Each structure stands twice: as C-alpha cells, then as structure tokens.
Image (cartoon, rainbow, N blue to C red):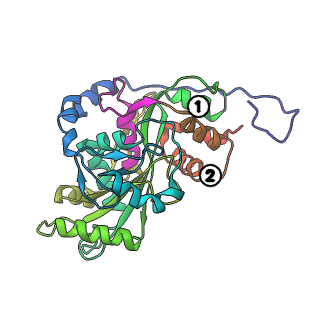
Amino acid sequence: MSTDMNNSSATPRAVVVHHAIHPERDKQFRALAVSSGFLKANQKMFRVRCTQCQMTLEKPLKCAKCKSIWYCSKECQRKDWPTHKSRCHDVERSSGALKFIRMFTLNPILLGLLKIGIAVDCGLIENPRIGFDVPFGVRVDIAIEPSNILDFVELYLNNKSPGEKLQGMLQVDAMTPYELTPERLNMWRKARARHDFAKDPVGLVDFIDVNCTDNLGHSATTEFSFPRIVLDIAKEREPFLCVSAVTGAETRKPMSGMTCLETLNSHIRADKENQLYLRTEMTDQDKEIIRAAGRNEDTYMARILKEKMQREHIYADLLQFSH
C-alpha cells in the first residue's frame, strides 16, 4: 500500500494497526444487553404495512427482486408497479434489510439510544410543538461492516480478496432530519392521529440501506413516539463515559445525536455471539462501500461512511490512508 498514489516510484509504507479490547467489555455487554429470548419472543410485535393500501400485514409479500418493499396481495403489487418499477433493482442479500430493522427496533437499548439522539438533533427539547402540530422526519442510514475492525482496515486499504467470506454486523452510519414530502406528511398525520390521546411527540423514521440511497422509495418507514423518559435524558445531556482499552484513561463525550450513534454502534460491535441477531455474512455490495471510501470516491454511501469514521474513535487515524 502506498499513500502517494500519484507517484509510481514512491516507497510503499506499511500500515501497522494496534487494536485493543477493554478487558471488561464482554462483562459489561452481558450486563446490559437484551437477551436473545426477549428478542425472539417479541418478533410478532413488529409489523409492516402494505406499500399500496397501508394495511397492517401478518405475512407480508415482499418484492422478489429488491426485497425492500411489501404488499398484502398480488393485486396491490400490480397497482404499485408503475411507481415501484424505476426504483426496483436486484440485491445480493436474500432477506433484504427487514430482519435487521426488526431486531434493531425491538431492542430497547438500541432504540432508546436512537430516540435520544433524534430528540437532541431534531430540537424536541427546545421546541415542544415538534411532533405534535409540527411534523418531522428522520433518515437513518444503515450498513453492514465487518465485525472485526481489522477486516475493516484491510477492506479500506483494498488488501482483502474479493471472494473472501467475512462476518458482518449492522451499523448506523448517519441520522439526518428531512422535510416531509406530501406523501410522508400524510403518513405523519395518520400516525399522529393514532397517538392522539398520548402526551408523546411523534415522528417518522426512514431506515435506508445500501440499496436505497437516492430517495426514500425503498425505505422502511416507521412511526416513533418519544416518551417522557427519552425526553428527560435528552434534556439532561449527561455525557457518555469512555474508557481507553490501552491506558484505562476515562474521557467524557458530550451527548449529541452522533455520540448516541457511536454508543449504539459500539454496543452492537461488542456482541460477539450474535445475541442481538444483527450479524450476517457480508455481501460484495457491503464490501464495495468500504473499498470505495478507501478510494476517496464521491458516492453517497462512501461519503457518509467517511463521516462516520471521522466521528467514531475506533477508526482512529485510518482516514489519513487511502489506496
């Protein structure tokens, strides 16, 4: 690997990566993590709606090609095809992203951290009208990264063989408020009406994976309510305590939407036994996003990955290298 890609005579430099795991990490994960039994028992709590008629589905029929959109019947699928056709394309992962979104949203620790981050970034504390008579939506970009950070480094530096199997894990790359389209505004109003007697603000959250980057056409949209405990934690802004695995030194990171994402990503990373059901084999599409970031390509997924790398401590100084 050479850090001077414009000079063919440049002397290749070796990149030495030191990676340490805090000795208490596994113990802390077991103490905090939701049990696999809880997640399995609550799977039926997760429901999707038909893309065409918005009926809640017990057994959704998904598009066989993109696996990112659901219907109640063949008739609704035919009706939606003129709209869906331009957005539909093949994906490598047979199950799509739905199973990861399901397990993520059923996990109270991960969901709580995401909601706190949204409350902070979307101004729910500063403006109590948001989520009641002021609608709002948030785009949450998810991706699959290697569960071993050293595999990530090799992909980023293009040192991995293309066909090599790698275990991956879900990660949240970005969280971005957006202005609701007329269609999404109507969805929010219906969601708000369903929560009409609740005292909690309500917003729309669109989970976006690698197969949906240019628009929200393939997103999994869900309605979130924000209970008082979430708003209280967001209001207090208690910093996150971080402990160095090498020196044991403690540092405190101010609470923000991005530090909430870093904390939930670290929690997923600590799950060595796939207790949270958020691990899977990486596809070539997953790997290519990381390689593209290492090549400094100006694609949406590569950009938000590099922004994540700038924010999160585990990537350290890796951004100074490219291939």
Where residue 257 sits: x, y (%)? 38, 55
Q: Which residue is nearer to you in this view: 296 or 60?
A: 60
The answer to whether residue 246 is left or right of residue 41 is: right
> Residue drawn 22% across and 39% down?
43
Distance from the alpha carbon under mark 1 to that under mark 2: 19 Å
Determine whether 161 is above or below 178 in the image.
above
Residue 98, image quadrant? top left
> Residue drawn 31% across and 51% down?
73
Q: Which residues are magenta?
A: 260-281
Residue 16, image quadrant? top right
- From the image, which quarter does the C terminus lie in? top right
The answer to whether residue 286 is left or right of residue 132 is: right
User: Disc 1 marks which residue?
Assistant: 153
Q: Secondary structure at mark 2?
A: loop
Where residue 21 sits: x, y (%)? 42, 25
Where residue 141 sits: x, y (%)? 45, 51
Q: Which residue is nearer to you in this view: 108 or 56?
A: 56
Instruction: Find out whether the residues at labels 1 and 2 contact each other: C-beta distance under 8 Å.
Output: no
